[in-house]
Amino acid sequence: MRRIALGTTLIGLAAFVLLATWLVPWGPVPGGTPGPVSADSVFTADQIQRAEDYTQWARVWGRSSLAVSLAVACWLGFSARGRRLADRMPGRWWMQVILVVAALEVIGRLVTLPLGIAQRQLQLDAGLSTSSWPAWVFDLVKGELVTIVTASIAVVALVGIARRWPRAWPAVAGGVLAVFVFAGSFVYPLLVEPLFNSFTPLEDGPLRTQILELADEEGVEVDDVLVADASRRTTTLNAYVSGFGGTRRVVVYDTLVDDLSDEQALSVVAHELAHARNDDVLTGTSLGAAGALMGVGLLGLLAGVAERRGRPRVGEVGAVPMILALAAIAAVLASPVQNGISRQIETRADVDALEATNAPQPFVALQRRLAIKSLADPTPPAWSQWWFGSHPTVLERIAIARGIEPK
């Protein structure tokens, strides 16, 4: 099994590197990315202080929650406690796997719940959240159920394949989970997004007309632009593209449509249309699939070491806590790579949007307003931006816009 696991890891790594080299825009800004503008050239001292005060505590609660969840996952995954929990589960092996996944997910959520409540209260105090506490709890429960279902499908498949092919399971399971990544990304807009938001077509008017004209000019096939009822949860402004192929959709928050000028809203949508034109969701999905293949190969290598030390095989239910702990660790360790790629893709979308709209000033005004509205830290710590920042900072985005001359 060790050779198969090593081969699976190397194939996944090679696929990831090739896809990243081919699909990721490593030089998205013509002439090179400029340095960030100064914060005091964009924001007042009070605005900077308010954003820093908020993000300081947001990082405290967020990073603490991450640390606690990892500690609990490792405590259960690498000790006899997790195995004893798995041994007490009733039913056939696949039912036991589902129950273990559900139990560990609920335990992880409960131990971090006080930190989640603190972060939620911080958002309320800052005026970033509009939903009630019961609505927040309901969303939390729905999110946990989605996580349990998706994790259970993946782990049941992994354990089942390891039971059926004890030696070749890393290669088989890696391929199957890579397919799951594609399937999940494809159906996410249809199955998951409607659980949290309602979507309606953007009303007829100048903005809709301009969006469809811009999409036509950019060669992006858009049947409709959907508006999400985000205002019942948040005051922040956002838009996104999800899905690919027949499930691709461009979504804008109702807060964005209601609060921004048409020029600024068009700048946001131009950014999302750039994602659609460049098939960025498909790029991320392909890299995720290669990462899944590599991750399963690494799991095979580590599982072989664990077995030699008397721990359960991957085909046994008792190995599920270890699998989930390793997956949690891998997600954190992969964050710098994932977010570094994301920042390059987001930068390209900014550049494409600026070139498509030929309107840098509305883009600059938009970025400033988005940052003020969401209390984004204009100068986050370098290590935090490198590890957790999925987008360029607002000061970097404004520098790019100021460096692009209108045509």
Image: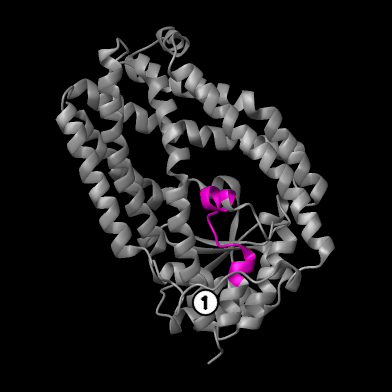
Dot 1: within a 10 Å radius of its alpha carbon, few (fewer than 14), some, or many (20 or more) residues? many
**Which residue is labeled 1 in the image?**
353
- In the depicted structure, whether residue 205 falls above or below residue 150: below
Horizontal placement of 82 versus 159: left or right? right
Residue 174, how many percent across, how many down? 26, 37
Going by the numbered disc 1, the residue's amino acid type is Ala
- In the depicted structure, whether residue 339 falls above or below residue 94: below
Evaluate whether residue 293 shows in this view.
yes
Q: Quadrant of the N terminus?
A: top left
Give the tally of numbered discs: 1
* Residue depicted at 45% across the width and 32% down the height: 329
In the image as oriented, which residue stretches furthest toward the right?
46
Q: Main secondary structure of the magenta part?
A: helix
Evaluate whether residue 242 shows in this view.
no
Residue 214, how many percent across, how many down? 50, 81
Label 1 secondary element: helix
Horizontal placement of 81 versus 116: left or right? left
In the image as oriented, which residue stretches furthest toward the bottom?
407
Residue 267, how many percent across, how many down? 59, 76
Q: Quadrant of residue 316?
A: top left
6 part of magenta stretch: no
- Closest to the observer: 214 or 80? 80
Horizontal placement of 156 versus 116: left or right? left
Which colour style is shown?
one colour
* Residue depicted at 27% across the width and 15% down the height: 307
- In the depicted structure, whether residue 407 falls above or below residue 340: below
Residue 346, how many percent across, how many down? 49, 64
- In the depicted structure, whether residue 370 falls above or below residue 106: below
* Residue depicted at 66% across the width and 55% down the height: 230
- Closest to the observer: 296 or 184? 296
> What segment is highlighted magenta in the picture?
383-397
Q: Quadrant of residue 176?
A: top left
